[in-house]
Image (spheres, rainbow, N blue to C red):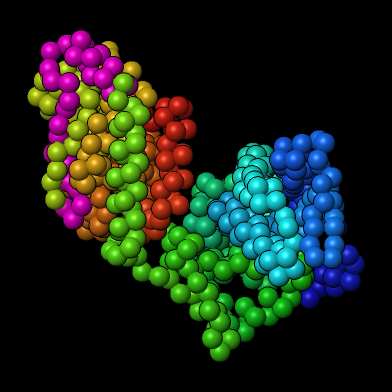
Amino acid sequence: MTNTTRTRSLTKPSRDWHDIYSARLTFTDFLVLIWVVFGVQIAWFGFDRANLAVRSSDLAVSYTVVSVILIATWMAVLGLYGTRNDRVLGTGFDEYKLIAGASIRLFGLLAIVAYLFKIDVARGYILLAFPLGIVVLMFSRWMWRQWLVAQRARGQFSSRVILIGAQESSARVAAELRTRLGAGYLVVGACVTSGEASNYLPGTSIPIIGNIDDAHTALDSFDADTVIITSSDDISPTRMRELSWSLEPGRHHLIMVPRLIDVGGPRIHTRPVAGLPLIHVETPRYEGHTLFTKRAFDIVVSTLLIVALSPTLAAIALAVRLSGPGPVLFTQHRVGHNGHLFKMLKFRSMVADAEARLAALQDTPRVVGNTVMFKMQNDPRVTRAGRFLRRYSLDELPQLFNVLAGTMSLVGPRPPLETEVSEYELHVHRRFLVKPGVTGLWQVSGRSNLTWDETVRLDLYYVENWSLVGDLVILWRTTKAVIVRDGAF
């Protein structure tokens, strides 16, 4: 450890962005709970009875005191369960799950206390305050997250990272983190253990400081607080342990990147055995209760959407009929679950002989996206009504009937054509392990603007890591993607 590091470890670290952001969250949580708890108290009892007493066998306390105790306890529980920990802020669902879990446990604890001590508390007051508090807390955190992501896109409120590992793996990790600045990792330098001599990581402007022995120099020079090990083949276990010991507790953080990529968080479990941090990766399952849950969700939601959108469906059908000769619905064979063919429904957005004209357009320079999926901006086969339908993805609405029939799901990989499947590499066929979806990661991540490799990676990530919560998030993001119309043509 250098003299600079020793000196710094003996002094109190300066207040960093974690403390600042956590303090802001604490203040906002406090305001939210005051507004919710006292608001429910006044709404339930009214101004005249706001000081009505809560009674037990030998005690009487006004509801104002109960509200103050509830707010203080709620704030303490949110802190104890780490809802403001920097490791859950800004990305993922852990922050929201911790808020819900902490609040529900507090509710259960208060219910037990009230039962044991025979405290007569108005049930409506409690049953309104807790769910409303959870919802408003989550909304408040969501608003803060939008602000935090915007700040991180400018390089602020982020962990400053030094990468350590082989040049190739460090460049790959740097590229991945650069596309996800909202995660809060800003790479400022690298110490490479192998690779060609260079001043910068390939394809980046990230400077190479030296090797692993220069890690502390890099941390001090760039005021970095996080070390990410991108590959450990060239680093002995002893050297790795020495590096972890030399990092300043509470200020520096050590992260290791496994070789396995595109694995969702719920599938990863860490279990220390005999000093070895074993990472357990659950294999994806496509059967049993998870499959039943997904199918039940598809049936219920698609039925509700068909009923709610029936006037819109009728209006679109009329517009398509008036747009020119041809059927209202366009049916096309697509490859679905386990490679079986099915007829996918869409509102017709092209002229009646669009398929016959396709061959003449295959070699046009206006084709965009990738070489496997044929997509074209300003396609001359699209009708005037069809351009409007495609702009807002309204032509996809009949696929709700595919979902109801069981040939598609609300969320899943894009259903490909047979001609596209013939060009697939072997690993791409894993996308057929689940039903294709009306929407999916491809649709909410850029659609036709994506390269083929990016499209495959998103589809396979979904197949390997799908969950009901993930489906809900994709459906929510679909609304934004449709409004923005990015990649829709």
Residue sitting nearer the eye, 100 or 121: 121
Measured as percent of width and height from the top left, residue 173 is found at 52, 57
Residue at image coords 62%, 78%:
240
Q: Is residue 75 above or below residue 40?
A: below
Q: Give the quadrant of the C terminus.
A: top left
* 252 magenta-colored: no
**Picture quadrant of residue 432:** bottom left
Measured as percent of width and height from the top left, residue 481 is found at 44, 33
- 471 horizontally vs 306: left or right: right
Residue sitting nearer the eye, 200 or 445: 445
Residue pushed farthest bottom? 274
Residue at image coords 52%, 69%:
231
* 332 magenta-colored: yes
- 43 horizontally vs 139: left or right: right
Residue at image coords 62%, 84%:
238
Q: Is residue 107 above or below residue 203?
A: below
Measured as percent of width and height from the top left, residue 252 is found at 73, 66
Residue at image coords 12%, 13%:
325
- 162 horizontally vs 35: left or right: left
**Picture quadrant of residue 397:** top left
**Picture quadrant of residue 116:** bottom right
Q: Give the quadrant of the N terminus.
A: bottom right
| Magenta-drawn segment | 312-339
Q: Is residue 30 above or below residue 234?
A: above
Residue pushed farthest front? 57
Residue sitting nearer the eye, 225 or 116: 116
Is residue 73 visible in the rendered image? The answer is yes
